[in-house]
Structure formats: C-alpha cells, structure tokens
Image (spheres, rainbow, N blue to C red):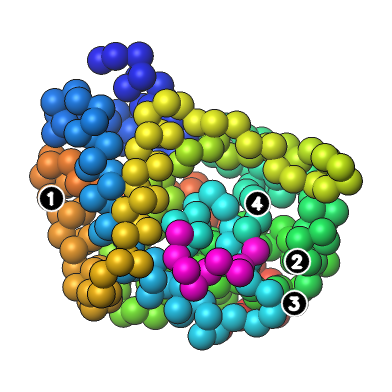
Amino acid sequence: MEDSWQAYQQTLSMELGHKLAQEFVASLHSKSRGCIHEATRLFYDLGTLWAPIMAAWSQWVLDHAQGTIAIILRDAKPLTELSITQHWKQLYLNRRICGVADELSNNSQSDYHPLLKCYLQQSGCLEHFTFVDSGCYGTVVLELHNLGMNFQPLFFFSKNPAIRGFINECGLSMAEGEILNDSLECAFPHVYERPTEFAITNGIVHATLQPSDTLSILFGTAAMLGVRSIRHKPDPSLQRATDSLLCSSEKARRGDFTGVLGHTSPEWSKKAEFLSNWPQHLRWV
C-alpha cells in the first residue's frame, strides 16, 4: 500500500487502535480501488449521511443550552458547518491539554496546560457556558470542574449517567449509541492533529494546530462539505437518518466500506473505576 495510505492508517491507529484502523483502511482502499479521488467522494457521501444528525443534535443543544455555547474541537467539529451554530464559540480542548491520560494515543500527561485557564477566560468560557462535545465518559468535564469552572456539558452520546447525551435521548440503545459515537469521533476524518500546545500571538492565546496526514486532510475536507450540503435541501427525519447510519454500520461489519464503523473502538480500561468514583453531587440530568 502506498505511503500516503500507510500514513492515513497510522493516524487512525491513534483513534481506533491498530487492528481496527488496518481493517478500516483496507476496506476503503478496496472499495475505491486505491483511487484517492474515489475515496474522497466516499467521504463526501459520508458527510451527507451525518448532516441531518448534526442538524438535529445542534437543535437539541440549542433547546437545552445555558449561557454561552462552546463546540469542543476536534470531535464535535462537524457542527461548525451548520448555519445555526455560526455564533457558537469553538474551543480546542482534549485530554492531553487538560492533563488527562489517554490510552490509545499513549499519552500519560498528568498536568493541564499552563495556558488553559487563560485560553478559556479569553474565550468567555470560564463559567456559565455549555460544553458541547461528542462524549462519552466525561474525563475532561471532571478535570475542568476540579479546576473550579462552572459549566454544563451536553454530549452527543454519554456513558456517564450524570451527563445528558443527545443519542441517549433519541431512544437508541447503548450499543447503537456507542457505534455512532465511535464513528463520529474516530472514523470521521480530521484535517488537524489533536493539538497539544497553546501559544500566545499578539496577546491572544490560541491552540497550536498541526495539519494531519495528506489523506486525512483530503477526506476530512470532503466530509465537511458533505455536512454543509444540508443547507441546500430539506432535512430527512431523524429516525431515517439514524437508521441510515446504523445500516451503514451493518454493511461495514460485513466488509463493505461505508465510512461508518462496523465495530467499536477499544473500550477504556478504567471506565468502571472512573464512573464508580464520579462525584455524586456532580449531575446535569
């Protein structure tokens, strides 16, 4: 397989683990016959599948938001393509920046970035804001709370009974929610790597962004254009949209590339311990 495909697989390995990333890329390479143009078109189609889900999620957030709304990047980035979200804040936050260890990416960071609080303050998000992320346990949520920040989290999918999740409230099963969330977080391609640093330019703190590999940039740009396409056509029903994604997952399970995962990514080994130690007073449901 060409170097560009190998680099793309390596990028995905940090999200999905080596085995699932290998299967995903091999399936895409086979479906597109190794043609990058055709593979890019498949990711545009993937974006159109996600578009109505993103539209429904954004409306759910608007219905339940308190104070300033902040989209947490990268994982919730497809929301930024919708007209309804154009006035929402956009924050680059992740486990590494907030001092939370991450198993798949081999990050053992234990201290939050020294510019984190300044970054949030300049964004108007030190308190009384709504933290909109894909999910699913709330490790970053807990860390920010422990740093004294006052906010409300709203997730796409939640495995934490103390945090509301859009997919949870749509009536889908936990297994269905997990496959959709993993597909959004891990299989939806990202143009930038997860930032690990903040910098100060002209007195403004900003995340330092590094471009992802070449194919992730091509595929991610196409997928975002697909999400944007919802601006130009009527929204299908939410039920039809989730059914389409779940059907795509079933096809992927049989070996047909759809851009949706057929299997979930490796589950966090400390899930049970983390949830059992969750502070009882910290609830938003």
- For the residues labelled 3 and 2, the Cα–Cα distance comes to 7 Å
**CB under 8 Å between callouts 3 and 1?**
no
Residue 176 at what x, y percent from top left? 28, 64
Specify start and end residues of the magenta stretch as a single range. 81-89
Residue 238 at what x, y percent from top left? 27, 76
Q: Earlier in the sequence, mark 4 or mark 1?
A: 4
Magenta-drawn stretch contains 112: no
Q: Residues within 10 Å of mark 1 (few under 14, many from 20)?
A: some
At a point 27% along the width and 57% down the height, the residue shown is 48
- For the residues labelled 3 and 1, the Cα–Cα distance comes to 42 Å
Disc 3 residue type (three-letter): His
At a point 33% along the width and 33% down the height, the residue shown is 21
Q: Which residue is mark 4?
A: 93
Q: Which residue is mark 1?
A: 251
Q: Which residue is mark 2?
A: 125
Q: Is residue 9 above or below residue 137?
A: above
- For the residues labelled 3 and 4, the Cα–Cα distance comes to 17 Å
Count of numbered marks: 4
Q: Earlier in the sequence, mark 3 or mark 4?
A: 4
Q: Which residue is mark 3?
A: 128
Disc 2 residue type (three-letter): Cys
Closer to us: mark 3 or mark 1? 3
Q: Is residue 267 left or right of residue 89?
A: left
Q: Is residue 138 left or right of residue 196?
A: left
- For the residues labelled 4 and 2, the Cα–Cα distance comes to 12 Å
Q: Residues within 10 Å of mark 2 (few under 14, many from 20)?
A: many
